Amino acid sequence: MADFYTEVDNLLPLGGLELNERVITKKDLKDRADRYFSVENHWDSMTFYLLDGEKVIALSETYFPNDLPLRDIGTGFTAVRKAYQRQGIATYLKIKVLQYYTENYPSFEYIQTENASSNEGMLGINLALGFHPYFESHAYQKKLEEN
């Protein structure tokens, strides 16, 4: 999974932010899971995967409070390896996520997702699936001068 996250993370359109090539390690993934999805944080997650043989080619992460009844679900990262992009896979995954939660959690009321304005592909998918903006945030970057 670390190689998947490294590949797709470095494909993200960053809208002018200058970040170095990122390398995601197994330890990074474990630390992230421990930090965000511990029992103390009252969050749970479910990830939907698509495989080509044994290779993960795409995934869509979801997260939600672990205190039911479930009302609000968030989608995190939805990503597709470069070689598999532009085949409708991200749309397919998002539709499967919506179907899964609608069918299995009748208390489900809302699903939210985040989208960088520079990621036009995912923005188009989210709008086509009926997501509507309800708040906007901005990320700013300043390069620190070398001393």
Image: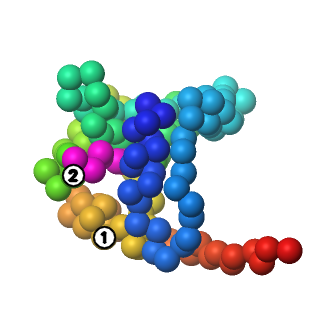
- Up the image or down, 88 lies above or below 56; here it is below
**Magenta stretch containing residue 58, yes or no?**
no
**Extent of the magenta region:** 77-83
Residue type beneath disc 1: Glu
Residue 11, percent across and down?
38, 57
Vertical side of 3 occupied by 74: above or below: below
Task: Describe residue 66's horizontal placement relative to residue 31 as left or right.
Answer: left
What is the number of the mark on residue 32?
Answer: none
Position of residue 2 measured from the top left corner of the image (x, y, whole percent): 48, 34
Instruction: Determine the residue located farthest toward the left in the rendered image.
Output: 87
- Residue 131: name its quadrant: bottom left
Q: Is 111 situated above or below 122?
A: above
Could you say whether the residue bearing mark 1 is in a helix, strand or loop? helix
Foreground residue among 19 and 35: 19
Q: Earlier in the sequence, mark 2 or mark 1?
A: 2
User: Would residue 69 be found to the left or right of residue 99 on screen?
Assistant: right
Distance from the alpha carbon under mark 2 to that under mark 1: 13 Å
Which residue is identified by label 1? 120
Outermost residue, top side: 54
Q: Position of residue 122 (x, y in %)?
A: 31, 61
- Residue positioned 47% across, 68% down in the render: 14
In the rendered image, which residue does mark 2 sit on? 85
